[in-house]
Image: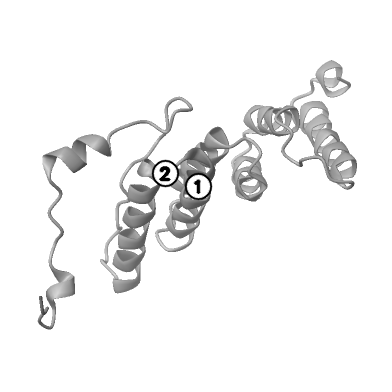
Amino acid sequence: SSAGPGDDDLPIEITADLEESAEGSFGSGPVTVTAPTVPPPFEAAALEAASEIDLYLAEAKLAEPARAAPLLLEAGHLREAALEDGEGALAWYRDALALDATFVAALAPVRRLLAARGSWSDLAATYETAVRAGMFGTDAGRSRRVADLWIERGLVLGERLSRTADAAN
């Protein structure tokens, strides 16, 4: 069939059976997937970012965890940069780690946003989960990266939370 100019802008109809199949979970517990809100003024760039985010989220809902994690990470990047919603982005970055605790790319934005808001307990727990999950694999550089992360965890526990006994473990 031939499409006329502007036909790409028409809404896509989602049938009830497709909508029902997209409601499943990612299989790793509760995952926060909320639609982004576009703050006024409704700038074209923000609307475009919101549309892209919707596409990433729709694909992530249907994907295996190893594929869904990078999609949530990218949705988070867009939400943070284009929509200036760091809290919403943090939820998606954390969801990416919940789906795949070894997904290294999601650690940096989680680390940055938790530190920026002073969520030191959450940050220390994130480090511990990452190390215990084997985030850095088994390559030769793993020991150094794990040690660096464990030291950073200890500094957060000792200096930010005054939990020196926990920092030593």
Residue wearing tag 1: 67
Residue 51 is left or right of residue 7, and the answer is right
Residue 109: x %, y % from top left: 61, 49
Residue 90: x %, y % from top left: 51, 43
Residue 32: x %, y % from top left: 40, 35
Q: Quadrant of the N terminus?
A: bottom left
Q: Residues within 10 Å of mark 1 (few under 14, many from 20)?
A: some
Q: Quadrant of the C terminus?
A: top right
Relative vertical location of residue 95 with respect to residue 161 in this rendering, above or below = below
Amino acid bearing label 2: Ala
Amino acid bearing label 1: Arg
Relative vertical location of residue 48 with respect to residue 116 in this rendering, above or below = below
Q: Which mark is residue 63?
A: 2
Q: Residue furthest bottom?
A: 5
For the point 12% across and 45% down, the residue is 15
Residue 165: x %, y % from top left: 85, 16
